[in-house]
Image: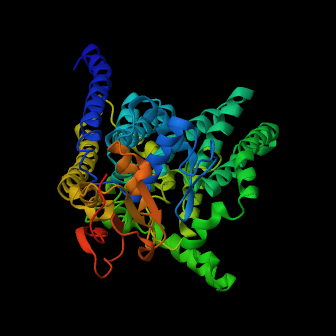
């Protein structure tokens, strides 16, 4: 092969790869969003409804003007995703499809940024394209980009932070604007998802790996700017004591009365469970809402590349500030999730797969052959790619096949029951709040049907339900009342003749 032809092919390959990557991602990313996942989970309705009210009035469902955090059932939801979705709804109006497309777009952008970081590290376009493709198709990241949850935004913000951190780690002189941008992305990360309230400060501490003796003043300036970004959080915390820890107290073992030694043992046990390769590569999160059952959350081949990347860092890059920071990030990414009762929780472990992907970059770059290298090197490299593709095809096949069957986990039956209540022509729809916050589903679906939401009446329990109205409840039907429709968790009933409009 002539050098001219070889050079032409080396320039053509990245272009063809980029076109194929974008085409595949576009098709896969927006395919089946109406039905997979099916329905709309309670948290998704809460986030979407509050995003709409913000887009219209600047107030949340409780009437609070421009809230720092959004009060919901049993917790306070994080603001970043909701405000961004509000901007989308301002243009499009409320829609389940639009909300899911928003999350899917965030996932696609995050995978592109993984590719950008891979290019910056390796200085090879092909490595960047391959790592972006791998990130996009990684089951862990793909699945959370199907959900209208705050966590869907977290990978994108984390990658923005890491790209800026990488750029600064390789520069001798840090400009003030660059320092401010790093602090800004770190601040946004802290507000994006609940684990960010711990993970953000841990990342800030990790900047000490960037030669603190030589760059102490710069790191202090970043910390100062980051602290300024936390003032709204701190003000909210002091004005709403325990609000930001309310949810954590219910899901963590730290609130128990066991000894410090016992809690330390639990923490180490949970760390071990979270780094266990079996759920990572074979079974994934046991919650069907977060993960399709029967397949792993991460590619086996990429995990092996990540392991070699860890070995390479420990052996040859111990004095490199960036790679020390990445190893530190990998370790601390396990801490927030390991403080809760669940083991291998996809959402709370979300930084972990991103650091694994970053650690795979040097391994992939080292293994990628040039056009002049012999056939066995190409055979090895193509075998690795084939292994990734095989697991990806298996995952996508299972996702397409079983994904739409998770309706019970996404409250897919609520619209059926809600429509049955509306079909009675009842002047008002009564919502029993005992048993769960059913009202937010009613508000959201009522909004989608352009229903006058003043017709929705919330009551504490079934005993206080007025006769002559359609009633929605999580609980059973009182004696003497007739069932209008019952599906899984939801029931619509009426007591006596329904009073029409």
Q: Residue furthest top?
A: 4
Look at the image and tell me in which quarter the N terminus lies: top left
Determine whether, in the image, residue 149 is placed left or right of residue 139.
right
Residue at the image position 34 percent from the left and 66 percent from the top: 471
Residue 135's image quarter?
A: top left
Above-or-below relation of 295 to 319: below
Q: Residue 190: x percent and y percent?
A: 62, 49
Residue at the image position 47 percent from the left and 49 percent from the top: 47
- Looking at the rendered structure, the number of numbered marks drawn on it comes to 0
Residue at the image position 64 percent from the left and 64 percent from the top: 245
Determine whether, in the image, residue 308 is placed left or right of residue 320.
left
Above-or-below relation of 379 to 248: above
Q: Residue 192: x percent and y percent?
A: 56, 47
Colour scheme shown: rainbow
Residue 375's image quarter?
A: top left
Residue at the image position 61 percent from the left and 50 percent from the top: 69
Q: Residue 115: x percent and y percent?
A: 42, 35
Q: Is residue 173 visible?
A: no
Q: Residue 50: x percent and y percent?
A: 50, 47
The front one of 410 and 431 is 431
Q: Is residue 24 visible?
A: yes
Determine whether, in the image, residue 174 is placed left or right of residue 23.
right
The front one of 273 and 501 is 501
The front one of 57 and 207 is 57
């Amino acid at each position: 092969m002539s050098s001219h032809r070889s050079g032409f092919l080396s320039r053509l390959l990245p272009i063809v790869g980029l076109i194929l990557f974008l085409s595949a991602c576009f098709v896969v990313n927006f395919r089946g969003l109406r039905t997979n996942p099916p329905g709309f989970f309670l948290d998704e309705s809460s986030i979407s409804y509050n995003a709409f009210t913000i887009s219209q009035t600047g107030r949340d469902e409780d009437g609070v003007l421009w809230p720092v955090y959004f009060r919901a059932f049993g917790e306070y939801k994080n603001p970043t995703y909701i405000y961004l979705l509000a901007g989308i709804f301002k243009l499009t109006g409320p829609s389940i499809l639009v909300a899911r497309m928003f999350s899917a777009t965030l996932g696609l952008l995050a995978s592109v940024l993984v590719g950008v970081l891979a290019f910056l590290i390796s200085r090879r376009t092909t490595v960047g394209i391959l790592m972006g493709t791998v990130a996009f198709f990684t089951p862990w990241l793909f699945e959370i980009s199907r959900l209208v949850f705050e966590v869907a935004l977290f990978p994108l913000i984390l990658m923005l932070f890491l790209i800026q951190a990488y750029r600064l780690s390789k520069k001798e002189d840090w400009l003030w604007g660059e320092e401010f941008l790093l602090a800004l992305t770190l601040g946004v990360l802290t507000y994006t998802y609940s684990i960010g309230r711990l993970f953000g400060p841990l990342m800030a501490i990790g900047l000490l790996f960037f030669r603190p003796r030589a760059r102490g003043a710069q790191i202090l300036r970043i910390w100062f700017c980051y602290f300024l970004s936390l003032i709204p959080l701190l003000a909210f915390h002091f004005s709403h004591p325990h609000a930001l820890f309310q949810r954590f107290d219910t899901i963590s073992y730290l609130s128990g009365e066991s000894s410090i030694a016992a809690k330390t043992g639990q923490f180490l046990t949970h760390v071990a469970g979270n780094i266990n390769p079996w759920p990572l590569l074979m079974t994934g999160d046991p919650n069907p809402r977060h993960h399709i059952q029967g397949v792993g959350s991460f590619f086996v081949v990429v995990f092996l590349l990540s392991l070699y990347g860890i070995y390479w860092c420990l052996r040859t890059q111990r004095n490199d500030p960036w790679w020390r920071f990445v190893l530190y990030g990998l370790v601390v990414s396990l801490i927030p999730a390991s403080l809760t009762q669940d083991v291998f929780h996809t959402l709370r472990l979300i930084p972990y797969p991103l650091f694994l992907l970053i650690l795979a970059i040097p391994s992939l770059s080292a293994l990628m052959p040039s056009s002049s290298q012999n056939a066995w090197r190409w055979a090895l490299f193509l075998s690795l790619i084939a292994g990734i593709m095989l697991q990806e095809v298996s995952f996508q096949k299972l996702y397409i096949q079983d994904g739409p069957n998770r309706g019970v986990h996404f409250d897919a039956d609520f619209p059926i029951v809600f429509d049955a209540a509306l079909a009675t022509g009842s002047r008002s729809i009564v919502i029993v709040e005992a048993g769960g916050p059913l009202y937010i589903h009613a508000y959201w679906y009522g909004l989608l049907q352009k229903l006058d939401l003043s017709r929705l009446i919330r009551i504490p329990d079934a005993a206080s339900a007025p006769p002559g109205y359609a009633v929605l409840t999580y609980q059973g039907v009182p004696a003497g009342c007739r069932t209008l429709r019952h599906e899984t968790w939801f029931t619509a009933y009426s007591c006596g003749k329904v009073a029409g409009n």
